Amino acid sequence: MSSWDQLRTELDLWQSEERIATAWWRDDDAVTVTPELETILAFEQTYKVPLALAVIPASLQDDLVERLVETLDTRVLQHGWAHQNHMPEGRKKQELDDIRDVDAVVADLRQGFALLSSRFGNRFMPVVVPPWNRIADDVVAAFHSLGIFGLSTFNARQSAEPYKGLLQVNTHVDVIDWRGSRGFVGEDVALGAMIAHLSDRRKGLVDPKEPTGILTHHLVHDAATTHFLDNLFSMEHSALSWLRIPGVFPWQ
């Protein structure tokens, strides 16, 4: 049985239980309009799969602001400040770190928040996507002072509300093989991760209310990645529902 058949079998199980398998799509590292960005925006338009675009505030270019005005469902999330690593050698990369004074980290976020909210208006959602999906707890605890109501990292969340008034919704399927080829991770791995999270949700092993998140990085997509996403977003099943981003993060 192919991985696609296994995915359909899992969705059939959701359907047999009269449940809907919710999913969402987040793409990271956006700063400007590129051919790769146009490809994923075309997927959003063609297949009506809403896109959450994590934008790096410090590198934002005017053309991205102008281009997103033309899109229907794209929403902008805050991808840290400058996507700059502050960790010493030997520690995993992190921008929203526990090395600097927390006030300095929060100041970066405040600057990015102000920039994105002023440039994108209601397309911007006060949700932080930490670069490298890592963030210090003290920084998260300060979100309330910034008007940030959402957090998105990677792997099944431990809590829907890690702090009062803060909703966490993560991604679970990374299509890039970062530790190897830095190209497409492969159908079996990508679909295997999607099936595993859907299955765990259905069985109650992880939070069943957390939608299954697909994570992409348009700037490094190769032909195989694009082909996979085309197949995934064009696949139809009555038990699979791609959520609009305000539905993923409904607290506003």
Image (spheres, helix red, strand yellow):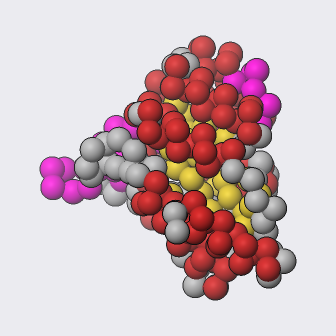
Q: Magenta includes 240?
A: no
Residue 157 in view here? no
Query: Residue 66 at what x, y percent from top left?
Result: 68, 16
**Residue lying at 34% horizontally and 49% vertically, measured from the top left:** 177
- As rendered, which of 73 and 1 lies closer to the eye? 1
**Residue lying at 41% horizontally and 52% vertically, measured from the top left:** 186
Residue 131 in view here? yes
**Residue lying at 57% horizontally and 60% vertically, measured from the top left:** 4
- As rendered, which of 191 and 203 lies closer to the eye? 191
Query: Residue 194 at what x, y percent from top left?
Result: 55, 64
Farthest residue in the right direction?
18
Query: Residue 29 at what x, y percent from top left?
Result: 47, 35
Query: Residue 53 at what x, y percent from top left?
Result: 60, 38
Farthest residue in the front direction?
1
- As rendered, which of 250 and 117 lies closer to the eye? 250
Q: Is residue 30 above or below residue 157?
A: above
Q: Is residue 235 above or below residue 162?
A: above
Q: Main secondary structure of the magenta part?
A: loop
Magenta stretch in the rendered image: 68-97
